[in-house]
Amino acid sequence: MPEMNQNSRSSARAGAPMRRGSMGRGPMGGMGGGKAKDTRGALAKLISYCRNQAGIILFALLLAAIGAVFTIIGPNQISRLTDYIYDGLTGGVSSEEMAEDIQNQIMNGEINIMEYLPEGTSLEDIDLSEIDLTDTDDELSQAILDNVTLSEEYQEAHADEGIDMDGIRGVAMLLVGIYLASAICNFVQHFIMQTVTQRTAKRLRGDISSKINRLPLKYYSGNAAGDVLSRMTNDVDMIGQAMSNSLSNLVTAAAQFVGCLIMMYYTDWVMATTTVLATLIGLILMVVIMSRSQKYFTARQESLGELNGYIEEMYNGHDVIRILNAEDEVVDKFSSMNQAVKNANFRSQFLSGLMQPLMTFIGNLGYVAVCVVGAWQIINGSITFGVITAFLIYTRLFESPLRQISQAMTQVQSCAAASERVFEFLAEEEMEDESEKKDRIENVRGEVEFEHVRFAYPNAPDKEIIHDFSVKVKPGQKVAIVGPTGAGKTTMVNLLMRFFEPTGGMILIDGVPTENIPRSNVHSQFGMVLQDTWLFEGTVRENLLYNTKGVTEEQMMQACKACGIHNFIMAMPKGYDSLLSDHTAISAGQKQLMTIARAMIQNSPMLILDEATSSVDTKTEMLTQQAMDKLTNKRTSFVIAHRLSTIKNSDIILVMRDGDIVEQGSHEDLLQQNGFYAELYNSQFEEAV
C-alpha cells in the first residue's frame, strides 16, 4: 500500500489525472444530497452482508420481543394490586353491594322512603324495586345515598374486611418474576447485539482495508484519501451504532406497541380507543417528518466525507499553501464545505429533534384523556379503580414505542446513508483477479524488455501517453530515463511495476511476460526509492527494516553508513530505537537517505530510483551517489532523474519525449550526437553556471 500511495503522486506528475482533492476537485454542488439514494437497497446490502450471523441476530431479536411481552403483562397485574389496596381502604366492598343493602332496607320498610320523595308524590306513584341507587344522576337515588346508613347486618358482615396482604404478596411475587425475566431477556439480547455489532464493524474495516489494496491506481487518482478514511471510520461507526441500538429497539418497540394494543382492548375497549386516537396523531406526524428528513441524513454523510478529504489534503500541503499565500482561499473553501456539513447536520437533527417534544406532548395528552374517560367509566360502574392505574401505565408503554421507533428510525436513516457509502466503495472495480496465475519468477537475473509498449490512462483512452516503446535491458545494467516533464518517465516505471497495464505490447522479465506473473511476485523483485519519501510513526529500526526479515544489526548499520546517516542516527536520543513522529526534527534530505538505506537493506534483485536525490544538497548528493553506485552494482536499475549529472555513469540513457524514445546510448555518445539530450544537458549546465 505505501508504494501505491507514493506512485499515485508520481503518476500524476507523469500525466495521470490529478487526484480529486482541493485544487483539482470538480464542482461541489452535488454533495448536498441532491441525487436520489436507494435507502432500501443499502439496508438490503447490509442485511445480506450479515447473513452469516442471521441466526444469532434473530435469536437476540426474539429475546427482545419476549422481554417486551413480559413488560406488557406487568400493568395487568398492577391493576389487580391496586384493586386489592383500594378495596381494603374502602372496606373491601363495592358500590353495588352497598346499593343492594340499602335497596333491601327500602323493600323491608326499614327506610321511610316518603322522606325523600318530591312534594306531591305518593308511594303508589313509584315502584320501589325500580329505584337504581347506582344512578348518580337520579335525584332520588342521590338523596337516599346521602342520608341513609348501612344495615347492622351488613356492617357486621364486613367488619373484618381490610387489605388482603396474601393477595398483594402473591401479585407482588408474580410481578418480580415477570420483570426479572424481562431484564434477563433484555440483558442477553443486548450482549448478543453488541458482540455481533463489533464483529460486523471489525469485518467491515477489514474488508475496506483489503479493498484498498485491490483497487487500481486510477481510483486513487480520482478520489480523495480523506473520503476513503471517512468511510472506514465515520461510516462504519455509524453502522455499528445503528445495529447495536436501533435494531433491537425497533423489535422491542414493535412488540410492545402490538402487545399494548391487544392488552388495552382486552381490558377496556373504550379507554383503549381513547389512547389509540390520542397517539395516532403523533404517529402520523412522525411518518411525515421521517419521509422529509432522509435526504438530509444522506447529505450529512457525504458532506462529512468531502470535508475530511479536503482537510487531509490541506494538512499535507500546509507548507505549499503558506508559500503561495493561499491561506485565505483555503479558509474560504473550508468555510464553504464546513457550512455544508453544518447545514446538513442542522436540517437532519432539527427534523429528528422534533420527534421528542412531539411524542412527549402526545403522551401527556394521552394521560389526560385516560383520566377523564376513566373517571366517567368508574362513575358508571364499568371499570374499577385499578383499571385506570393500568391504563396510565399502558399509555406510557404505548407512547414509548413510538418514541423509540422515531429515535431508531433516525439512526436507521443515518445507517442507510453510511451503508450506501461503504458498500459503494466495496463494489468499486478491482484489479484483475490473479489467483489462477501460476507463473512466478525466482532467482531473477534482471533482464527486462519493453516490446512495442503502448499506454493510455483508463479515463482518457484517446490520449496515448506511451507510443510504441521498445527497449531491451541486460542483467545488471543501469538504465537512466530522462526527458522533460510529462514525457512518460514515471509512467514507464508504473507499467514495469504493474501499477497500470499496457494498452498494447508487453513487458518481460527474464523472458516471462509480466501480465502472466502475479503482481505481488513482480513487486517483490524491485526495491524502490521515490521522490516522495514515506516514513511511518515508529522507531528508526522499524522504518529501516519495514517488511524485511533476516537482517542482522551489522547489515543494517553498514547500509546506513554507506548512505551517510549512521552518525546522525546514533546522535538521536535512543539511536536506532529512537521514535520517528511528526514532532521529530528530521530534514527532508535525511528522510530521503533513510529510504535509500531501506532499499539497500531490502536487497532486491532490481531497483527503481525515481528522483531519489532530489531532496539532498550537493555535498550529500555526492555521498548518496556513491552509496547508490554500491546499491546498483550488479543489479538491473532504472533511474529517473532530472539532474543529468547524476546519471553520467549509466550503461544506457533513454531519452524520452512525448511518449517516445528519441535517443538512447551512453552519456558520451549522446553528447557527441548533439541532439535533444545534449540540449537538455547543456541547458542544465548553463543554469548551474
Image: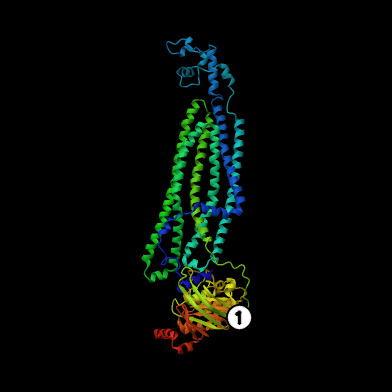
Query: Residue 483 location in percent, x, y?
Result: 45, 80
Location of residue 52 (image quadrant): bottom right
Query: Residue 572 location in percent, x, y?
Result: 52, 74
Q: Is residue 236 above or below residue 171?
A: below
Residue closer to the observer: 84 or 202 = 202
Query: Residue 266 location in percent, x, y?
Result: 55, 33
Residue for point 43% across, 63% down: 310
Q: What colour scheme has been applied to the protein in the rendered image?
A: rainbow
Three-letter amino acid code at the position of disc 1? Arg
Identity of the residue furthest to the bottom in this view: 672
Quadrant holding the N terminus? bottom right
Query: Residue 122 location in percent, x, y?
Result: 46, 9
Q: Is residue 682 left or right of residue 576?
A: left
Residue closer to the observer: 665 or 146 = 665
Residue closer to the observer: 578 or 634 = 634
Q: Is residue 570 above or below residue 679?
A: above
Quadrant holding the C terminus? bottom left
Residue 453 in sight here: yes
Residue 530 in sight here: no
**Number of disc labels:** 1
Q: Secondary structure at mark 1?
A: loop
- Mark 1 crowdedness (10 Å alpha carbons): few <14, some 14-19, many ≥20: some
Location of residue 617 (image quadrant): bottom left
Residue closer to the observer: 140 or 530 = 530
Q: Which residue is mark 1?
A: 445
